[in-house]
């Protein structure tokens, strides 16, 4: 199941259950080298594919808290809180061009983003996908994202920015968005 670019989910499951885990898709059970992992039960690994349901899209259009996961070169998953926009079926992110996270993304464009409903964090959605990067020389994208969250353009005007567009490959919802 490991690929040249493992997803943050692959890396996290390997860290939790050992490097020999794999997913049996037909039964939806997490297996290791000696059979089903104790305590895992019937962890279902089939994640729905886009399009997202209307309730998920409605939640993603709001300025909710979000956390992004990427994978470092040594395989360690790292997370960071982030702002985002939902636009044309993609998640739009923006980064300070000097962030180490961009180096990780360029090496492995697979990312995960969890968005939590501000009213009830039990309701949340996690999307997995690939990210494409492009420069934001006029700070147009960071201004749109900042305005979405704060009502104002982004205040730091002297540092280069990079925009990321996440194409959703799969998702899973919890709480009111249960999938």
Image: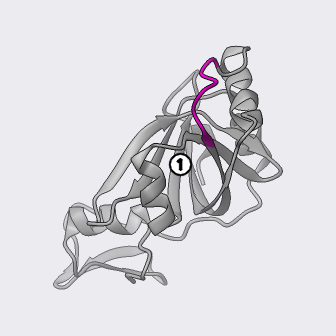
* Residue 41 visible in the current orientation: no
Looking at the rendered structure, the number of numbered marks drawn on it comes to 1
Q: Does residue 144 lie above or below 92 as drawn?
A: above
Query: How would you rate the neighbour count of disc 1 (Cα within 10 Å): few for under 14, some for 14-19, many for 20 or more?
Result: many
Residue at left offset 16%, top offset 84%:
34
Q: Which residue is mark 1?
A: 113
What's the coloring here?
Answer: one colour
Q: Quadrant of the N terminus?
A: bottom left
In the rendered image, residue 117, in percent from the top left (x then y), is placed at 59, 30
Quadrant of residue 40 within the rendered picture: bottom left
Q: Secondary structure at mark 1?
A: strand
In the rendered image, residue 155, in percent from the top left (x then y), is placed at 63, 17
* Residue 100 visible in the current orientation: yes
What residue span does the magenta drawing correspond to? 155-161
The rendered magenta stretch, by its main secondary structure, is classed as loop
Q: Could you tell whether 17 is left or right of 67 in the image?
A: left
- Seen as rendered, the residue at the extreme left is 34
In the rendered image, residue 59, in percent from the top left (x then y), is placed at 70, 35
Quadrant of residue 129 within the rendered picture: bottom right
Quadrant of residue 94 within the rendered picture: top right
- Depth order, front residue of 26/5: 5
Q: Quadrant of the C terminus?
A: bottom right
- Seen as rendered, the residue at the extreme right is 88
Residue at left offset 39%, top offset 45%:
79
- Depth order, front residue of 91/59: 91
Q: Could you tell whether 103 is left or right of 75 in the image?
A: right
Q: Does residue 154 lie above or below 87 as drawn?
A: above
Residue 7 forms part of the magenta stretch:
no
In the rendered image, residue 148, in percent from the top left (x then y), is placed at 73, 24
């Amino acid at each position: 199941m490991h690929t040249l670019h493992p997803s943050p989910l692959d890396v996290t499951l390997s860290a939790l259950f050992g490097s020999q885990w794999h997913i049996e898709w037909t039964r939806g059970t997490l297996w290791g080298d000696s059979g089903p992992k104790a305590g895992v039960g019937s962890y279902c690994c089939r994640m729905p594919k886009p399009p997202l349901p209307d309730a998920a899209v409605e939640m993603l259009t709001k300025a909710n808290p979000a956390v992004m996961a990427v994978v470092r070169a040594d395989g360690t998953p790292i997370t960071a809180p982030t702002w985002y926009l939902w636009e044309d079926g993609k998640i739009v992110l923006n980064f300070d061009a000097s962030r180490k996270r961009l180096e990780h993304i360029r090496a492995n464009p697979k990312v995960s983003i969890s968005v939590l409903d501000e009213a009830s964090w039990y309701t949340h959605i996690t999307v997995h996908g690939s990210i494409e990067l492009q420069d934001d020389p006029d700070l147009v994208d960071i201004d749109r994202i900042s305005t979405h969250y704060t009502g104002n353009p982004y205040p730091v005007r002297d540092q280069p920015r990079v925009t990321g567009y996440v194409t959703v490959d799969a998702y899973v919802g919890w709480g009111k968005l249960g999938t």
